[in-house]
Image (cartoon, grey):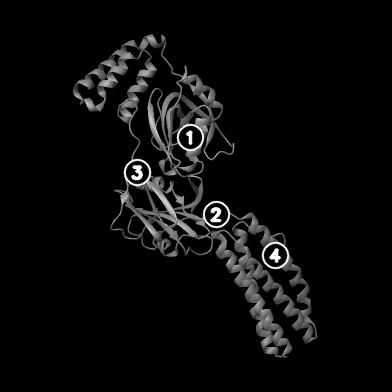
Amino acid sequence: MTAGRSDAPHDPRAVCAGACTALKLFPLPGVVLLPGAPTPFHLFEPRYRALAAAAMAGDRVVCLPTLVDPAEALAPRAALKPVAGAGLVVADQRNDDGTWDIVLHGALRVRLVEELERGAPFREFRAEPLHDLYPPGGAAALVGEMEALAQLCYELATVLPPESGAGQLAEAVARIRVPGAMADLVAAAAIWGYDVGHRDPPRLSTVRGGQLALTYGPEWSRDAGARPIDGLALEAPIALRSRRGILRAGLVRAAGAGLDPAPAALRARWKRPGEPDAVRLGTIPALRYEARLADGGRSLLFMVATRSGYLAVGCEGAARPVRALVAACASVAATIEPLGVTVLPYGPSAQFGRRLSEIMSALAPARAGGFPALASRSLRRRAASAARIAAAHRSAAGQLAAIAVPAQDAQLRNALVLRLDQVAGGFTRLGRAALARDAAAYRRERIAIAVADRRLRQALAALAIAGYELRRGL
């Protein structure tokens, strides 16, 4: 591991103000960074590891905004409160596992103005510095209030135990001559508990199981007597428990039907399930489900597509407080680390879409050129045309079956291959009926082909809903 401590700049406020053209954001739910308050953080998500590395290589400035809704911690663009704290990293340590421990010293309040799109895995904003406002008469007009606050801190130190840090707070306040700095220091003590900013980061644990690893805080513990979440069949499951509810994670081999990968047995337990939201767990794309259970509880599910199936993190607990369960579960899900599997993006695959369009464009003229001959008086011509059309559909099915597709689109691809094979089989039997001069069998196969062809078009329509566009239709 490597450790460092910055050379303290002469004016931290000026350094942070100069960085306001592009502030690196570390948004957290329910956390405030106040000027003058040194605060430790443990950065373990991949995007925030990248943020720490970028800050250490540059101006060492990090901005800490607060989320409007803690439940949106995993949303790609969660709403942020407009006023945030910017500070300097005054101590840092890069650990052997790639995580960072930093101490961020608050220096300046800022107002977030505009989000920047610069290709970084973390969010960046243009901001404007905010300065303390004083009543008429300036700081001198607040001398009485400052003395009263200092006296209050002294009185607290006389009644609280030494380990509370109240004595250190009283001494620090007595040395401050700037009203805003005094107010910020006392507020930080009220929020965090005063110990001169050198609190240890929360103890985190990492658990590995099968194809994923998760990191969790002291709120969670390993669940020795783990019961599964009904309807969520997992390979090598990870089991955690907190006072909010239970968490289960692992690999799901069999996903739901069509466009929805949520297991059907689990979805059947949800009351009025809605559509999933596309989110990011760190930098990993995922789908997020939230639903009420029939027994009044709450269910939360995250699914990450891989070439081996879906990595799933599911939580269940009491319906109230809902936001507490959601935030606790999301904080663990955000640390997911795939092990030995390739993560696939959600949304249409450009490579598969290109090959799908090429294959279906090649099939269209084979169909169009062969259908007229099916009305020929010559039964041999009918049989030959049916054989060519069958071969074209069978070739298209074989080509499609050989293409690697995103896990979430595999069922749609497989459905299309099945329909192409069914149409090919129908035309093969049609040709045989023509050569056998079996009029009844010929009519039956024409009807069967019409049904199979309609299902083929429905399979193509399902792919279009998933975002795949064909250059040429059938």
Which residue position holds label 4?
359
Tell me the number on the disc at residue 52. Answer: 1
Counting from the top left corner in percent of width and height, residue 371 is at 75, 76
Observer-side mark, 3 or 4, equals 3
Counting from the top left corner in percent of width and height, residue 353 is at 65, 58
Residue sitting at the far right: 377
At label 1, which amino acid type do we have? Ala
Circle 4: element type: helix
Tell me which numbered mark, 4 or 2, is placed earlier along the sequence.
2
Quarter of the figure with the C terminus: bottom right
Question: Closest to the observer: 328 or 453?
Answer: 328
Which residue position holds label 2?
344
Counting from the top left corner in percent of width and height, residue 436 is at 71, 90
Quarter of the figure with the N terminus: top left
Circle 2: element type: loop
At label 4, which amino acid type do we have? Ile
Circle 1: element type: helix
Please tell me which residue is depicted at 53% across the width and 25% down the height of the picture.
19
Which residue position holds label 3?
217
Above-or-below relation of 292 to 328: below
- Distance, label 4 to label 1, CA atoms, is 47 Å
Question: Closest to the observer: 315 or 4?
Answer: 4
Say if residue 248 shows up in the picture.
yes
Observer-side mark, 4 or 1, equals 1
Tell me which numbered mark, 3 or 4, is placed earlier along the sequence.
3
Observer-side mark, 2 or 1, equals 1
Tell me the number on the disc at residue 256. Answer: none
- Distance, label 3 to label 4, CA atoms, is 51 Å
Q: Quadrant of residue 218?
A: top left
Please tell me which residue is depicted at 30% across the width and 54% down the height of the picture.
223
Circle 3: element type: loop
